[in-house]
Every structure is written in C-alpha cells, then in structure tokens.
Image (cartoon, grey):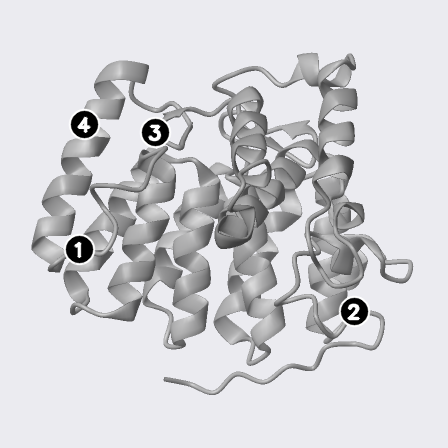
Amino acid sequence: MTTLKSKRPNYVGPGWAAAPQGYKFLRHSPSIPSADVALQSSDEWVILLSVFNEARNGLFDSLDLLPAIIRNSSDFHVICASIRILGDAGTDLSVAALVEFFTHPDTDARLAAYTAATNSANLALIKDLIEAAGHLKRGMELDVLADSVSEALEREHAQLVEPKNPAEFQSNALHKVSEIEARVGKGKPVMFGDILDIKNIIAEIRRFILRSDADEYRESAEDRLLTFEAITGIWISEWFDEDENIEPAKVQQTLEEFEASDQAKKFVPGKRYFLGHPILPGSS
C-alpha cells in the first residue's frame, strides 16, 4: 500500500474528506481559470477545481483530464475527489476510466473507486466491479466492494453484503444484474435496484432521515444526500448543523420546495444528470 499525502490548499476546509459537506469544498474556492488555462499550472488543485467549475456549467469535456491526475498524484484528497467526480458524472469516458482505479495501488483510492462505481448508476461498470471481486480475499475490502454493489442493485441490503467468499458474491451479484436488466432493460442507469429516478432518491432520503433509529443509519442517509446533490446541483451543506449532524426539518423543507418547483420536472427517469445538467449519450 502506498502512502498518500495531502497538499490541501488553505481555502479547502480541513475536514472535507471526512465531513458530509458534499461539493462545498470545491465551490467555496477562489476564482478558477478555464481548464485550458489551468493546464499551464503545475498545481493539481487548480486543474481539479477548474474541471469541476466547467462541469457546473454543463461543460464535461475537461473531465478527461482527471484520470491522468489520479494516476500521477500523491495527494489523497485530489485522488479521491477526482474519482468521486468521475463516478458522479457518469459520462462514457469517466465510466471507462474508473475501471482502471479498481486496482489502484492505494487501498483508500480503490475503496473510493468502488463507491464511485455505485454513483455512476452504470450496470456495465457494476459488472466490472463484480469481476474485480475475484481478485480479493475475504475481508474488509471485499465487504466494502460488496456493499457498493449492493447499493446499486438492492434497495434493502440483504443478499449481497458480507459475502462468505468472492465466488459466491460474484454469482449472486451477476444473477441480480441479469434480473434487473430483464426488468428495466439493458443500458439503463440503475440505482437501488431500479431505474435511476430522482423521485426514488428523495424517497430513500426520507426513508432514512425519518427513522426512529436514524442515527444508526446516518451513513446511508448521507450517501443519498450526496447523490441528490450530485444529480441536481442543489448544495447539501446547509442541511447539517455545526456538529455535522443532519437536520431533518431543513432537508424536508428543501425537498418539498424542490418537488413543487418546475426544476424537478426536468429530471427524467432513466436519464443521467450531473450538477443539474443532462449527460448525453456519447458525452466524454
């Protein structure tokens, strides 16, 4: 395992990697040049921030700069943020690039790639992730990979989590993929075992934040909030108090306002979006 360091600039909050702040760490940054200009910089953060800024404006071509950053960087934060953006964007290029990072030399970077595969809602990539399980032994990393696949293929974590061995997991997971493809069609984006739909994500958020035992499911709730943010571009950082606890009343208010707005109507079931912009077939 390699040892990754962080050269996080001062304007990026020190707790962003662990705290449920969504993309706040990238949007609260100094004025950033275009990706073409940023390429002249040797600062990985400048390039990363410029790529994200262009994606916020619906310009996804510069995402193809991220794989090289991930390969060459020794900065843990840069690597994980870049991997996360690739998964959330779910473009053809970013999905293809993520497969490479299932075997990144650093364990934490691999784990980030597993989660990013789930966020991509791409069943072909999930199949690649299932195949990658064959190279693992039973243990923590296999459990994390299985949990990521379960997030994509199951609404209730039941069959796929905590596998006894890689072969059993692969068999069960591939059967689940075939079952979903038969139901929703091949090539469709899928999350939680069903067609990708913002309504389902909102229902999932409410399912977890309104539980009487919500504290036990905090991580699941946060994952769904992050997915909502990545798709809609509605920032979630204001939904947390100073101690990083979810404030259900604020979440509910924002979700209700979103559902009643014209904005909600533009998110078509079965289509991919990143930061409120549609991902068109063939997008890089």
Q: CA distance from mark 2 to mark 3?
A: 35 Å
Residue 12, which numbered label? 2
Within 10 Å of disc 1 (Cα), the crowding (few <14, some 14-19, many 20+) is some
Q: Are marks 3 and 4 in contact (CB under 8 Å)?
A: no
Task: State the SS at label 3.
Answer: loop
Within 10 Å of disc 4 (Cα), the crowding (few <14, some 14-19, many 20+) is few
Q: Nearer the viewer, residue 99 or 213?
A: 213
Within 10 Å of disc 2 (Cα), the crowding (few <14, some 14-19, many 20+) is some
Residue indicated by mark 4: 178
Q: Are marks 3 and 1 in contact (CB under 8 Å)?
A: no
Three-letter code for the amino acid on which mark 4 is drawn: Ser
- Residue drawn where x is 55% and y is 54% of the image: 84
Closer to the chain start, of discs 3 and 4, is 4
Q: CA distance from mark 4 to mark 1?
A: 19 Å
Q: CA distance from mark 3 to mark 4?
A: 11 Å
Q: On the picture, is 10 further left or further right than 132? A: right
